[in-house]
């Protein structure tokens, strides 16, 4: 697979980025050099499941999110390409991935994926919040695709809030948690409503709220990504 080396949000990545012949390789590399004016990154393409892992603070591992592209076949896109991200949810384009959180993984594989994500994040010195994108090969080996120290946090469009909700946290509590990390690091008080205070770490002022072993998302606001539980392959009802 050929990618621009210094882009984000899958810019420059399409189904044509997966190469089978040398002639196609040269075309893709030339396109990146000319269009994006940067190096082309050439990697082995890993067949398998698309996963992402969120980490809060030092060691709070969120439920693994699995992105399922099975129903996107007619689009020609079968992984997180630019078109998939830009037009996600567009049924006319068949860009309708499903989200499983927790992912459809055994406890052993889940632990292996989370361990690899945690080690990658720590090796790069991330803090507060990070999302690690992983490809799980058909023989069960997790490959780190990217460590994102500034993941998307849009409550309706981004992957991280799906994992936040699956962990039993509200979006507001999550944002307060990030502020609290900064406050603790600086040891400085903040002003809330005109009074000097410290930002609570959760609605119960607990540093590590309980995390259910398995949770299917429900009650998502209008327009948000929907996740499905392991007990049903049907998407949740609603717009």
Image (spheres, grey):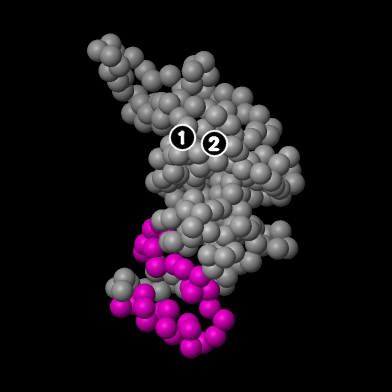
The verdict on residue 14 being magenta is yes
Measure the alpha-carbon separation of dots 2 and 1: 8 Å
Q: Position of residue 178 (x, y in %)?
A: 41, 31
Residue nearest the observer in this picture, 146 or 121? 146
- Residue 115 in sight here: no
- Mark 1, residues whose alpha carbon is within 10 Å: few (<14), some, or many (≥20)? few
Residue nearest the observer in this picture, 138 or 226? 226
Identify the residue shown where x is 43% and y is 26%: 172
Identify the residue shown where x is 43% and y is 61%: 82
Residue 222 numbered tag: 1
Identify the residue shown where x is 49% and y is 18%: 203
Residue 189 shown left or right of residue 228 in the figure: left
Q: Position of residue 239 (x, y in %)?
A: 50, 39
Asked whether disc 2 touches disc 1, contact meaning CB atoms under 8 Å apart, the reply is yes
Of all residues shown, which one is farthest toward the front? 92
Residue 238 numbered tag: 2
Region of the chain picked out in magenta, as a range: 6-34
Residue 208 shown left or right of residue 104 in the figure: left
Q: Position of residue 21 (x, y in %)?
A: 54, 85
In the depicted structure, whether residue 166 falls above or below residue 43: above
Identify the residue shown where x is 49% and y is 74%: 16
Label total for image: 2
The verdict on residue 146 being magenta is no
Callout 1 secondary element: loop
- Mark 2, residues whose alpha carbon is within 10 Å: few (<14), some, or many (≥20)? few
Q: Position of residue 230 (x, y in %)?
A: 71, 42
Residue 207 numbered tag: none
- Of labels 2 and 1, the one closer to you: 2
Of all residues shown, which one is farthest toward the left? 194
In the depicted structure, whether residue 154 falls above or below residue 207: below
Q: Going from the N terminus, do you reach mark 2 or mark 1 first?
A: 1
- Residue 201 in sight here: yes
């Amino acid at each position: 697979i050929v990618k621009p080396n210094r882009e984000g949000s899958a810019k420059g990545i399409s189904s044509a980025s997966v190469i089978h012949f040398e002639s196609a390789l040269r075309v893709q590399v030339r396109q990146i050099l000319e269009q994006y004016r940067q190096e082309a990154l050439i990697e082995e393409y890993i067949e398998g499941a698309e996963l992402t892992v969120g980490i809060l603070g030092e060691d709070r591992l969120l439920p693994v999110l699995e992105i399922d592209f099975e129903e996107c076949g007619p689009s020609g896109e079968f992984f997180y390409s630019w078109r998939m991200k830009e037009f996600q949810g567009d049924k006319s384009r068949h860009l309708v991935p499903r989200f499983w959180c927790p992912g459809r993984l055994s406890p052993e594989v889940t632990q292996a994926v989370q361990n690899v994500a945690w080690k990658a994040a720590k090796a790069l010195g991330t803090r507060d919040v990070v999302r690690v994108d992983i490809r799980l090969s058909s023989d069960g080996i997790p490959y780190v695709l990217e460590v994102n120290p500034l993941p998307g946090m849009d409550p309706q469009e981004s992957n991280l809030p799906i994992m936040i909700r699956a962990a039993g946290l509200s979006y507001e509590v999550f944002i307060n948690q990030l502020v609290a990390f900064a406050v603790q690091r600086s040891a400085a008080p903040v002003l809330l409503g005109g009074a000097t205070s410290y930002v609570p770490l959760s609605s119960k002022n607990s540093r590590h709220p309980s995390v259910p072993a398995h949770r299917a998302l429900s009650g998502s606001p209008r327009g948000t990504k929907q996740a499905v539980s392991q007990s049903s392959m049907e998407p949740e009802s609603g717009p």
